[in-house]
C-alpha cells in the first residue's frame, strides 16, 4: 500500500520538482541573446547591419524547425513499429525531450554561452538543445520498453549532463571540428544507450520478447519517422554552420551522402537476406548512416563526389554491421531485433 | 423524393455558388500587395531596400508554411482518434479550411488592408487568414460528427465573419495587443464552438456515443496532429510579429512555455488518474495550452523564465480543468470524452 | 537455379554499379556552385553583396525542404491507400527518388549549368533535381505493383534522361516559360507513365486486381500524402522563381488556385456519385490539379481572382475527367480504380 502510494506520487513529484528547479535556474541565469532582445536596434547600429533580415533568426529558424521535427516526429515515430510500445515511444519521447531541452539550454549555456553570470539564449541555443536531446533519443532506442518514465527522466538528466561535459572537452578543450555533431551527438548517444542497456540487462527479460510484435501499419508509421529524419538531415548538419556558403555547402554535402547511402543499403540488404527481399529495418537505419557519417565534415570542402563516397561506404558498413553484429548482447536486447521475424 | 433530390444538390450548389461569389468579390476587391507586385522594384528603390531578401516574403514565408501545416495536418489529425469520424475529420477540415481562408482574406481585408477600394494581399494576409481558420478548426472540435458538410460550411461563413468583427473591435478599436492571437483566435474559437454545441444539443444524441470508439492507430494519428501543433507553435506565435528581434523573442518565449507545460501536464494527468496512468487526451490537449497562453505576450520581454512559469501554470489549469469540468454539458457532448474509456 | 541466382544478384548489382557510376561522373563533372564554395567571400565582394543573407541558400532553402517533403512523403504516401502495396509504395519511391536525384543533377547539369567542363551545383540545382524526380513519382503511380525494383530503376534512368532532353527543348530551344513546371514535370510524367502502362499491359493482369484492396487506415495515410502535396504546392511553384516579388506572387497565386479547386472538386465529386457521397480519391487527386494548372503562370501577374478561376475550372475538369474516362485502358490499369469499390 505504501509502496503503491509512493509509486503513484513518484512521476508527478519528479515532474513538478524538476520543473520548479528549471524555473528557478532560468530565473537566475537565463536571459535573451542581444539578437532576441528589445535593445537589438542599438546592437544592430553598432554592428552596421543594414536590415532586420540580418538577425540570426532568419539565418537559422527554418533549419531549427526542421531539426525540431526530426527530434519529435522523426525519433518519436521511428520507434512506433513495435505495436505494444507505439504509444510509449511517441509519448515518452515527448516527455523526455521537453525536459531535456530545458536542462540542455542550462548545461550548454554554462559551458558555452556564459557571460557576466548570465546565459544569453537565441535561436542557435535552441538548435543546440535540440541536438543534445537528439542524442538522448538515440540512446532511448536501446532501452525502450525496459524502463519507467521516471527512470527515463533520470537517464535524461544524466545523459544531458554528460553530453555537455563531453561536448565541452571535445569542442572547447580539444578544439575538435564537429559541425553535424557525429561525435558529440550520435556516437555519444549510441554508446550511452548501449552501456545503460548492458547495466539493465537481465536474462529473464528475454521472456518479454513477445511484447515486441510488429504490425503492418506500425511499419508505415516508422517510415514516417525514417523519411523525416532522412529529408531533414541536410538541415540538421547545416543548422549551426557559419552563415553563407558554409551552410549552403553543408546542406549539399549531406544531400549527396544521403542519396548515395540509400542505394548501397538496398543493395546489401537485398544481398544478405536469404530470399533477396528487402528488410525495412535496414532501410530505416542504414539510410540514416549517410547523414551521420558526413556530419563532422559537412561544412568542409568535401565536394559532391566526396560526399557520395562517404554515403556509399556508410550504407555498406551500417547494413553489414547490423546483420552480423545482431548476436551481441546489446543488440539482442535492442528493440530492433524482432522485426526481422516479420512475415 | 423531392427532399432527396434537394439534399443531393445542396452540397454541390453551396460549394459552386459560394466559390463563384468568391471569384466575383476577389475580382472586384483583391489585388497583390506591392511586395508581391511586378512593380516592386520601384517600391524597393523608394524604400531604400538594398536587396531582394528584404521582401516581406523572406521574413514570413517559412512561418507561414508551418502555420499552414498546423491548420491542415495539426487540427485535421488531432480529431482522427475517433475511428468513425477519422475521414470526416480530415476531409471536412480540408473543405472548411479551403473555403474559410478565402472568406477570411476578404473579411480581414475589408477591416484591415482596405486602401483606395482595394484589398492588397501579401504573405502576412495569408497567415492571418490561416489564423482565422484555426479558430474555426477549434470550434469544429466541439461539433464533430453532429453536423453535415453544408451545416459546417454555413458555420464557417458565420464564424469567419464574427471573427473578423471581433478582431476589428479588439485590435483596431480597443488597441489590444494580441500577437499570438490567444484572445481573437483561441478563446473566440472555443466559445463559438461551445455555444453552437449547446444550441445543437439534443438529449438523444447521447445514444450515438458508441460511434465514438477509439482505436490504437487512431491515437497514433492524433499524436501526429498534436506533435505538429506543439512543434510549430513557435512559428504560430511569431509569424506576424515585427521583423527582427520581436519575431526572434516570440519564438523563444513560446518554445520555453511549451516545454514547461509538458511536464506539469504529465504530472497532473498522472496524479488525477486512478491508476496513475497517463491519459493521452490530457497530453494532446494540455500541452498545447502552453502555446495558447503565451500567445498574447510572446512578443514582449517576457524573459525565458517568465515563459516557463506561464507554461507551468497552464499545464496544471488545463489538465485539472479537463478532468473536473467533464460533467458540464458542453464537454459531455465533446468528442474528447470517450477516449477516457479506452482500454 | 541459375536464373534464381541471377535474380538474386540483379538488384544489388544494379544498385552498386550505378552508384559507382554516379561517383565517377560526379568526380569528373560536379563541383560546388560559387555560392556554396569556400571562395564565396571574394565572389560576394565582386557582386557588391552587403550581407551573407544574400546567398541564394536563404532565398531558396525553405522552399527546397518543402519540395523535398512533397516528393518523399507526399508522393510516397499518396499511394499507400493500397494495403498490399503500402510498403512497396513508400520504400520503392524512396529508392527511385534517391537514385533519380543524382542522375537528374548530372543530366540537368549537362544541359543547363555546364561551364568550363564542370557542373556547378547549388540549392537551385537540388530543387530542379527534386522536380525531375517528381515527374518520375507521377509516372510511378500508373505502374505501381506491376514492376520489380530493378525495372523501376531502369524506368527512372530513362525517364530522367528524357525529362532533361524535353526540358532542354522546351526551355532552352523554344524559350517556353514554365515556372511551376506544369508542362515539363506533370504533363510529361503523366504521359510517360501512361505510355509505359500501355506497353506493359497484359490482359491477365486484371486477375491480380484483388491485390488492390483498400483499408481504412491506408486512406488516412494517403490523406497525409495529399495534404502535404496540397499545403506545400505554393513552395513548389515558387521555389525557382526570380528573387523578390516573383517568388511572393507565385506563392499567392498557387495558394488561391488550390483553395478554389477544393470547393469545385467537392461539388462535382458529390454530384457525380450515385448517393451524393464524397469520394476520397477525387479529393486526393483533383485538389492537386489546382496547383498543377497554375504552375506555368504562377510567376506572372495572374492576380488572385485569376488564380481562383483557374482552380475553379481545374477542380471541375479533373473530377469529371476522372469519373468519365475511367473506362480507358490506362485507367483500368491504374491503381486508383479499386478504391471506388470501397464500402
Image (cartoon, coloured by chain):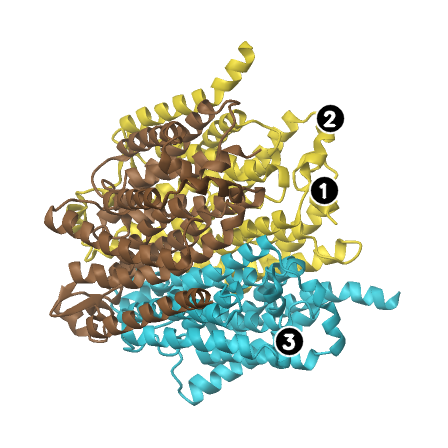
Chain colours: A cyan, B yellow, C brown
Q: Going by the picture, which residue comes out furthest to the top?
A: B2
Query: Which quadrant of the figure has residue C10?
Result: bottom left
Query: Which quadrant of the figure has residue B146?
Result: top right
Q: Chain of mark 3?
A: A
Separation (CA) of disc 3 from disc 2:
56 Å
Q: Is residue B285 left or right of residue B45?
A: right
Q: Quadrant of the N terminus of chain B?
A: top right
Separation (CA) of disc 1 from disc 3:
47 Å
Q: Is residue A181 left or right of residue B218?
A: left
Query: Which quadrant of the figure has residue A266?
Result: bottom left
> Label for residue B325?
1
Number of residues whose C-alpha sits closer than 10 Å to that of mark 2, classed few (under 14), some (14–19) or many (20 or more): few
Q: Is residue A42 above or below residue C290?
A: below
Q: Is residue A3 above or below residue A225?
A: below
Q: Is residue A332 left or right of residue C12?
A: right
Q: Residue at x 22, y 60 (%)?
A: C107
* Residue A54: image location, x then y, percent: 29, 63
Q: Nearer the viewer, residue A299 or A167?
A: A299
Please state which of the two labelled residues, at mark 1 or mark 3, is closer to the viewer.
Answer: 3
Residues at marks 1 and 3, common chain? no
User: Label 3, on which residue?
Assistant: A332
Q: Residue at x 59, y 77 (%)?
A: A326
Separation (CA) of disc 2 from disc 1:
19 Å
Q: Secondary structure at mark 2?
A: helix
User: Label 2, on which residue?
Assistant: B203
Task: Choose the circle earlier in sequence order: 2 or 1.
Answer: 2
Q: Residue at x 16, y 74 (%)?
A: C42
Q: Secondary structure at mark 1?
A: loop
Amino acid at each position: 500500500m505504501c509502496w503503491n502510494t509512493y509509486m503513484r506520487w513518484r512521476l508527478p513529484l519528479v515532474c513538478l520538482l524538476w520543473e520548479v528547479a528549471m524555473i528557478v535556474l532560468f530565473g537566475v541565469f537565463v536571459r535573451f541573446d542581444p539578437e532576441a532582445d528589445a535593445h537589438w536596434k542599438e546592437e544592430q547600429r553598432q554592428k552596421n547591419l543594414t536590415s532586420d533580415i540580418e538577425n540570426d533568426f532568419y539565418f537559422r529558424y527554418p533549419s531549427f524547425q526542421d531539426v525540431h521535427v526530426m527530434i519529435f516526429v522523426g525519433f518519436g515515430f521511428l520507434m512506433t513499429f513495435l505495436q505494444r510500445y507505439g504509444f510509449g515511444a511517441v509519448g515518452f519521447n515527448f516527455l523526455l525531450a521537453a525536459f531535456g531541452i530545458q536542462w540542455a539550454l542550462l548545461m550548454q549555456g554554462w559551458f558555452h554561452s556564459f557571460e557576466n553570470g548570465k546565459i544569453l539564449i537565441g535561436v542557435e541555443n535552441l538548435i543546440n538543445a535540440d541536438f543534445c536531446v537528439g542524442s538522448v533519443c538515440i540512446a532511448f532506442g536501446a532501452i525502450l520498453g525496459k524502463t519507467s518514465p521516471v527512470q527515463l527522466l533520470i537517464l535524461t538528466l544524466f545523459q544531458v549532463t554528460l553530453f555537455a561535459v563531453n561536448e565541452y572537452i571535445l569542442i572547447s578543450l580539444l578544439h575538435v571540428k564537429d559541425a553535424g555533431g557525429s561525435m558529440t551527438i550520435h556516437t555519444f548517444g549510441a554508446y550511452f544507450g548501449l552501456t545503460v542497456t548492458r547495466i539493465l540487462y537481465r536474462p529473464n527479460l528475454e521472456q518479454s520478447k513477445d511484447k515486441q510484435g510488429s504490425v503492418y501499419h506500425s511499419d508505415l508509421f516508422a517510415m514516417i519517422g525514417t523519411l523525416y529524419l532522412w529529408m531533414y538531415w541536410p538541415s540538421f548538419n547545416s543548422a549551426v554552420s557559419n552563415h553563407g556558403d558554409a551552410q549552403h555547402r553543408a546542406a549539399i554535402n549531406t544531400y549527396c551522402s544521403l542519396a548515395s547511402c540509400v542505394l548501397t543499403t538496398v543493395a546489401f540488404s537485398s544481398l544478405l537476406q536469404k530470399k533477396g527481399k528487402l528488410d525495412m529495418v535496414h532501410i530505416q537505419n542504414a539510410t540514416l548512416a549517410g547523414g551521420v557519417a558526413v556530419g563532422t565534415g559537412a561544412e568542409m570542402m568535401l565536394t559532391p563526389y566526396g560526399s557520395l563516397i562517404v554515403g556509399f561506404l556508410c550504407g555498406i558498413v551500417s547494413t553489414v554491421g547490423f546483420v552480423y553484429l545482431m548476436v551481441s548482447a546489446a543488440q539482442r536486447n535492442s528493440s530492433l531485433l524482432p522485426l526481422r521475424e516479420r512475415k
